[in-house]
Image (cartoon, rainbow, N blue to C red):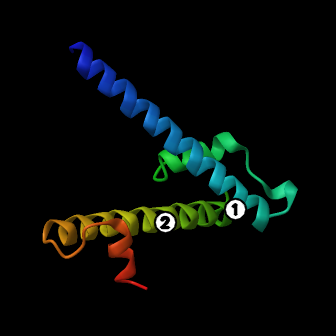
Amino acid sequence: MNLLEKDLKLLLDTLADRCTAEALRTIMETMEQSMDDGELPPAEAVRSFIRRPERQTELTAFQQALAMDRMLEMAEVNFRTLCDLLRYHYWKQAGAVSSVEEFLELFR
């Protein structure tokens, strides 16, 4: 593995760690709003679940449902953002818009 490949792997690993941390933070906030303090699972149990939801977990069915629901909400937002970026790219490539502001005006 050359230096560029190592740097790329390090970057991707760092991004994955940050994404996991952000997902965990968001899921824990959702759980704090939806559950009593005594029902909150340990953060490490939630981290384990979001990394491998198919594996056995100590989370209750309700905790799993909350975590999965929040992850799906985040995925929906990410997918919608990706679709909008692709849409903007093709509209700009076709000459229909020349800036993000013009693109956004199409939807107002």
Expressed as whole percent of the image width and height from the top left, the position of residue 86 reads: 25, 65
Quadrant including the N terminus: top left
Amino acid, disc 2: Leu
State the residue position of label 2.
72
Tell which circle, 2 or 1, labels the residue nearer the N-terminal end: 1
**Circle 1: element type:** helix
Expressed as whole percent of the image width and height from the top left, the position of residue 3 reads: 26, 14
Q: Is residue 21 above or below residue 4?
A: below
State the residue position of label 1.
30
The residue positioned 64% from the left and 55% from the top of the image is 26
Q: Identify the residue at the far bottom of this view.
A: 108
The residue positioned 25% from the left and 68% from the top of the image is 98
Res. 56 in view: no
Q: Does residue 91 appear to the left or right of 103 in the view shown?
A: left
**Circle 2: element type:** helix
Quadrant including the C terminus: bottom left
Expressed as whole percent of the image width and height from the top left, the position of residue 78 reads: 42, 61
- Relative to the observer, which residue lies in front, 90 or 74? 90
- Relative to the observer, which residue lies in front, 82 or 38? 82
The residue positioned 65% from the left and 39% from the top of the image is 44
- Relative to the observer, which residue lies in front, 45 or 102? 102
- Relative to the observer, which residue lies in front, 8 or 52? 8
Q: Identify the residue at the far top of this view.
A: 2
Amino acid, disc 1: Thr
Are there few (<14), some (14-19), or many (20+) residues within 10 Å of tag 2? few
> Disc 2 versus disc 1: distance between alpha carbons?
13 Å
Expressed as whole percent of the image width and height from the top left, the position of residue 63 reads: 67, 61
